Amino acid sequence: MSKGEVLHEAVTLLSESAKHAPRLEGVPTGVEGLDELFFVTEWRDGKPVQRPLGGIPRYAVLQVTGVSDTGKSLMVEQFTVEQARRGTPCIFLSTESPAPFVAMGLRARATAMGVDFATIEERIVLLDAASHPVLAQDLPTLFNTLTYALKTYHVKVVVIDSLTGLYEAREMLAREVVRPVYSFLKKWYQTALLVSQKRSGHELLTAEAAGGYAVGHILDGSLVLAKQTVMTPQQAKLFQAPIGETVRLFRVDGCRLCGHDTTTHLLEITPAGLVRVGPRLSQLSGE
């Protein structure tokens, strides 16, 4: 069509669109303490009551952001293993590590989670943009390859580690990458976690990431991971950790599909290499 023409197919009544609206339900993440942070509100006996969703919202496209060594890749690997364990076909798109090293990480996460790796190997499809950079540099090639994998393997879950790798060295163009990626995943009704990198100058617990706030504004919500060195007696008391130790923090920074916990939590990386969302900081301080 030419510019200026009326796009009639873009105009619909709410009653028509509502017929195609998906059911709001949770997708378990495999991360202890995370799934109960999302909820829906129901009315019972004339009063609003929160009901845990039991996971991230199905068909949500969420950002997982933080500086290095906060547990971002561990979190999305756990999510992938958990979904594959439940029988859901998944795509793991890596712009950071070649496929054999992604497989090594997923095997380690499965072992830590007590999942037999042999039972999930055929349910996880790896897309290796680290070894094939054209996937990260050309969106049409990426989308055609993703479409092939989605159709061939009947995929329902997509993980990208990392989204930042799709606009590396060209962060000013982040919106031009993130918006098409988001629209593609929504078109195919995928539940997705997209890792994005924070720069050291970004605020600790905000959705800001490489590319500015574009990622957080476009996607359905953000899971923010952070780390902080305990430097004062007051911090040592708050975090219940000695001075000099590094503590990790977690918060959900927005989710447009459902209600969510808004407080800051401790985040732990266990000796087995799993991330676990811990208590609210307010619980530690006795508030």
Image: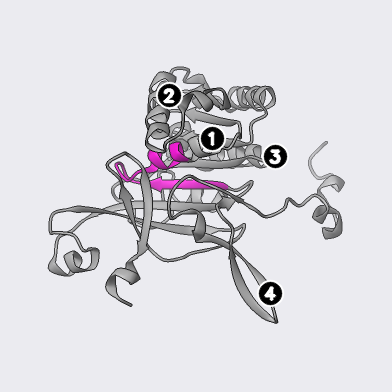
Is the residue marked by circle 2 packed among few (<14), some (14-19), or many (20+) residues within 10 Å? some
Real-space Cα separation, disc 3 to disc 4, in angstroms: 32 Å
Q: In the image, which disc is placed on residue 103?
A: 2
Mark toward the start of the polypeptide (1 vs 2): 1
Closer to viewer: mark 3 or mark 2: 2
Q: How many marks?
A: 4
N-terminal of the two: label 4 or label 2?
A: 4
Q: Which residue is mark 3?
A: 187
Q: Earlier in the sequence, mark 1 or mark 3?
A: 1
Label 1: few (<14), some or many (≥20) within 10 Å?
many
Of residues 202 and 25, the one drawn nearer to the viewer in this rendering:
25
Residue 4 to residue 240: above or below:
above
Q: Earlier in the sequence, mark 3 or mark 4?
A: 4
Q: Depth-wise, is mark 4 or mark 1 nearer the camera?
A: 1
Disc number at residue 85?
Answer: 1
Label 1 with label 3: CB-CB less than 8 Å: no
Q: Quadrant of the C terminus?
A: bottom left
Q: Amino acid at mark 1?
A: Arg
Q: Are marks 3 and 2 in contact (CB under 8 Å)?
A: no
Q: Please tell me whether mark 3 or mark 4 is closer to you in this view.
A: 4
Residue segment shown in magenta: 61-78
The amino acid type, in three-letter code, at marker 4 is Trp
Q: Identify the residue shown where x is 68% and y is 74%.
A: 43
Which x, y percent locates residue 20?
Answer: 80, 49
Circle 3: residue type: Lys
Residue 72 placement (x, y as % from top left): 39, 42
> CA–CA distance between discs 3 and 2?
28 Å
Mark 3, residues whose alpha carbon is within 10 Å: few (<14), some, or many (≥20)? few
The residue nearer to you, when weighing 25 against 203, is 25
Q: Which residue is mark 4?
A: 43
